[in-house]
Amino acid sequence: MWPTAWPAGYNAGMSDTDPPRVLLDICDGWSPDLMDVVGQIAVAFGQLEWVVYLSAKRKSTKALREFRKEKENRTDKFGTWCCRLLERYPGDNKLSSLINRALIAGKARNDVIHAVWGKDLSDQRLGRWRPSGNLGIEIEPLRVLLRSVREIRDELNEYTNAKKKAPQAS
């Protein structure tokens, strides 16, 4: 067991009203069901990031090769592509709704993926910590997040995929 504290600078400039620093044991031993859901969130969100990029490409109506030649490229961050879509298509209410939902899901995903997971040495409780405190490791809220990410991914993919919207030849 190697007790650790927050990474250097993580809670820099804390005030008296900020949550106390927590000494954590960086440990394993998480339930397989919990780790399965966390892994699925990571995969589904990676797919959502790709769909956001594809949505920008699809809305531009350019061929992928031509779209990639522009100074913008696929390595831009998720939030940047979301903002571009919101700025370029302000009258598309359905797109705006989906992108805003994606941004909210992105914040929740960050609270899972970028949290410090460990055991609080003061009470031996497992948790995931962000600057706001212990966000807990209850599995049901994570399942809700997973369903939400998948729904947004699928709805955005369907909404921006003109090939799926085209009438089928008989």
Image (cartoon, rainbow, N blue to C red):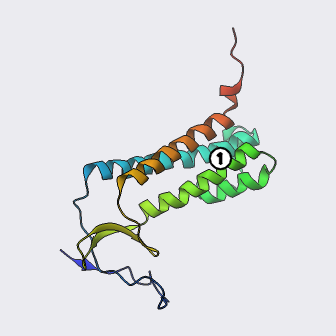
Camera-nearest residue between 161 and 38: 38
- The location of residue 120, given as percent across then percent down, is 28, 74
Q: Residue at x 68, y 37 (%)?
A: 160
Judged from this view, the residue extending furthest toward the left is 1
**Residue designated by label 1:** 98
- The location of residue 95, given as percent across then percent down, is 71, 45
Camera-nearest residue between 61 and 16: 16
Camera-nearest residue between 8 and 143: 143
Based on the displayed image, in which of its 4 quarters is residue 81 positioned? bottom right
Q: Residue at x 37, y 48 (%)?
A: 37
Residue 121's place in the image compared with 154, above or below, is below
Q: Residue at x 68, y 16 (%)?
A: 168
Image quarter (top left, top right, bottom left or bottom right) of the N terminus: bottom left
Judged from this view, the residue extending furthest toward the bottom is 16
| Circle 1 crowding by C-alpha within 10 Å: few under 14, some 14–19, many from 20 | some
- The location of residue 135, given as percent across then percent down, is 41, 66
Q: Residue at x 24, y 67 (%)?
A: 27
Based on the displayed image, in which of its 4 quarters is residue 107 positioned? bottom right
Based on the displayed image, in which of its 4 quarters is residue 122 positioned? bottom left
**What amino acid is found at the position of numbered circle 1 in the picture?**
Leu
Whether residue 170 can be seen here: yes
Residue 12's place in the image compared with 143, above or below, is below
Residue 17's place in the image compared with 142, above or below, is below
Camera-nearest residue between 33 and 90: 33
